[in-house]
Amino acid sequence: MNKKAVFFLSIVSIMGLFLISVSIYNMPKIQIYELILWTLLAGMSQSFLVLFMQNGVLSVVFAIILAAHLYQGTYFAVIVAASSVLFQFYHPRKGVYEHVFNRPFYKTLFNMSNLAISAYISGSVYQAMYNTLQAGNNLYLYMLCLLTYITLFLLFNSSVLILLMTFLKQQPFFKLWKKNILWAIPNFYALAPFGYFIYLLYQIPNGHIYVILLFGPLLLARYSFQLYLDSKKRYYQIIQTLTAAIEAKDKYTEGHSKRVEMYAEKIAQKLKLPSSKIESIKVAALLHDIGKIGIEDFILRKPESLSEEEWEKIRQHPNIGLKILEDVDFSDDVKEFIKSHHERYDGKGYPQGLKGSEIPIEAYIIAAADAYDALTSDRPYRKAFTPQEAIDIIKQNKGTQFHPLVADALISVVQEICLTKAPQKG
């Protein structure tokens, strides 16, 4: 763990311990069995975790924390939130069980502190808004206060975690936040009604029994989180398997698909395409050459120029790829990008001879990324061009083979990469 990560973890832990101490000192008078019940409920929620990034997890404990806050206020919610980590027991992978007795102390302390800080800040703001707006007399103002609480808790809890991961992984904060948190936001807000109902149910006679019964649907929400992530994981495993099958046919293309994905993603970001489109581009880039599985090895590895008949077979690989993926559950966009990645801006490409706006911008992006990586890689019939030589070729074919905007974006991306790799003087 680097110094920045250690420093940040220490600051968060000190703040968390301070807020937990303040909350214990100011905690409202409550029956001990109630504190135990709320803590166990929160601990059970923490034990049904969803692993969504390396060292990062998501749980349904927020519903319990929200209910605890509505029931007894901010200080009580902080104690319940922090204590839940002590009762956390989960099964991250086969043969491995994690609990407070075998978990690194700093990890337990950080998780407790993160929850305590999030619960304290969101709870304090909620209470200030509630009192100032006199929200108890107005349903809409009350809902506004609740929405503020939920939003602040999400922002602080996720941001503290992603900041730590930023220091550990040395990756941009917003990139990590978008990749690992953005998808979970709707599910997080969906937990809020459960928290509110737990609060209401607990106040009626024998309410604790109803709360325990309501715990079933709450854990079902967690199960839906896990199903989503498992399906996404399997989706990428299929892609990786297919990509490996492509590259196993030709040693010269090893790593090609991954590099094309990298270039394509950067070009798409440069052109400010939406994240949903970028994800489709990345998948299509990884699989753009899947059709070459159906091309004879001697053609792919031939060191001399191909005959016209052999070229005709090569030109069929986009259609072969489409046929291979026909029954695979990929989006139509991904399949279209793969089919069109050898079309040209001037209409002289294949397999359909499309031109101009008839070709999706995403296919142009993959085509440019594919061409640049092919130019800068060794092939059986030639040695690799230098990055500058490849840029010159891209410029010469801008407006004919390549879409002008995509060509400019690719050149900009390559120049940035080369600048980053250049040795620094001084």
Image (tube, rainbow, N blue to C red):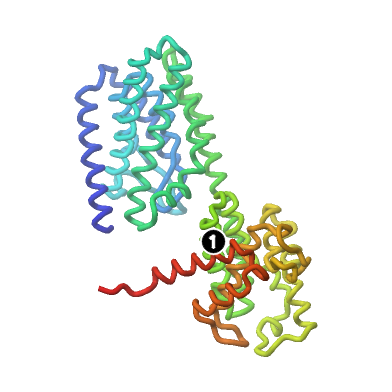
In the image, residue 115 sits, relative to residue 167, either above or below, namely above
In the image, residue 151 sits, relative to residue 171, either above or below, namely above
Q: Amino acid at mark 1?
A: Ile
Q: Is residue 83 left or right of residue 226?
A: left
Looking at the picture, how far across and down is residue 258, in whole percent?
54, 67
Quickly name the residue at label 1: 267
In the image, residue 52 sits, relative to residue 39, either above or below, namely below
Residue 285's image quarter? bottom right
Q: Residue at x 73, y 80 (%)?
A: 296
Looking at the picture, how far across and down is residue 234, in whole percent?
58, 55
Label 1: which secondary element: helix
Label 1: how many Cα within 10 Å (few below 14, some 14–19, many 20+)? many
Quadrant occupied by the C terminus: bottom left
Q: Is residue 149 left or right of residue 140?
A: left
Q: Residue at x 70, y 85 (%)?
A: 298
- Which is more toward the observer, 300 or 21? 300
Report whether residue 289 is seen: no
Report whether residue 322 is seen: yes
- Judged from this view, the residue extending furthest toward the top is 137
Quadrant occupied by the N terminus: bottom left
In the image, residue 414 sits, relative to residue 97, either above or below, namely below
- Which is more toward the observer, 254 or 359? 359
Q: Is residue 318 left or right of residue 135?
A: right
Q: Residue at x 54, y 47 (%)?
A: 229
For the image, the number of numbered tags is 1
Looking at the picture, how far across and down is residue 140, in whole percent?
48, 16
